[in-house]
Image (tube, rainbow, N blue to C red):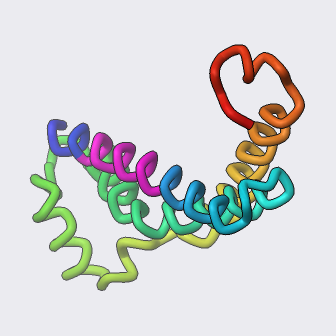
Amino acid sequence: MLSGNLTAEIYWFLYSGVQFSCYEYLQLHHANLVSSSFSSGALSSAVTTLVTYPFDILRTRFVYQGKDMYYKHILTGFASIIKDEGVLGLYKGLLPCLASIMPYMGSCFYIVEFLRSQCSIFHCLGYSV
């Protein structure tokens, strides 16, 4: 169970770091426009998913393996998947994941940027528009 928890922690740490870094980078090149926030959010979520998806696959397999412990550690888990299924085994189910996460995160980033541009409460909280 420890390997599953560690895998989840690595996954979420990478997910947050990659997503917000990529989003900020894309928005920087679009002059932080509200109109570009949907595409920047969608693209940053796609890049993030590509980077972190193998950790999500392994985390899921740790959770569902039961008492047999086929995957004992993170490195042996990755090695087993690659050996048994090839590198593409680390990306099973990627396309449906991308199809759902891209519009969702694009919408989330758009809503946040739109509200930030419209609401004066963000100024009171110290956020710049």
Tell me the quadrant of the picture where the C terminus can be found. Answer: top right
- Judge whether 13 appears above or below 21 on screen: above
Tell me where residue 64 appears, x and y as whole percent: 33, 46
Residue 1 falls in image quadrant: top left
Residue at 24%, 43% (x, y): give it.
Answer: 4
Q: Residue furthest right?
A: 118
Determine whether 12 is above or below 32 in the image: above
Splitting the image into 4 quarters, where does residue 8 fall? top left
Instruction: Tell me residue 20's x, y (percent).
Output: 52, 50
What secondary structure do most residues of the magenta stretch adopt? helix
Residue 117: x and y in percent read: 83, 36
| 18 relative to 45 in the view: left or right | left
Q: Is residue 101 left or right of residue 62?
A: right
Residue 21 image point, x, y percent: 48, 55
Q: Say whether residue 28 is left or right of residue 53.
A: right
Instruction: Identify which residue, 123 or 97, lies in the foreground.
Output: 123
Q: Is residue 15 magenta?
A: yes
Q: Which residues are magenta?
A: 7-18
Q: Is residue 73 magenta?
A: no
Q: Nearer the viewer, residue 94 or 29?
A: 29
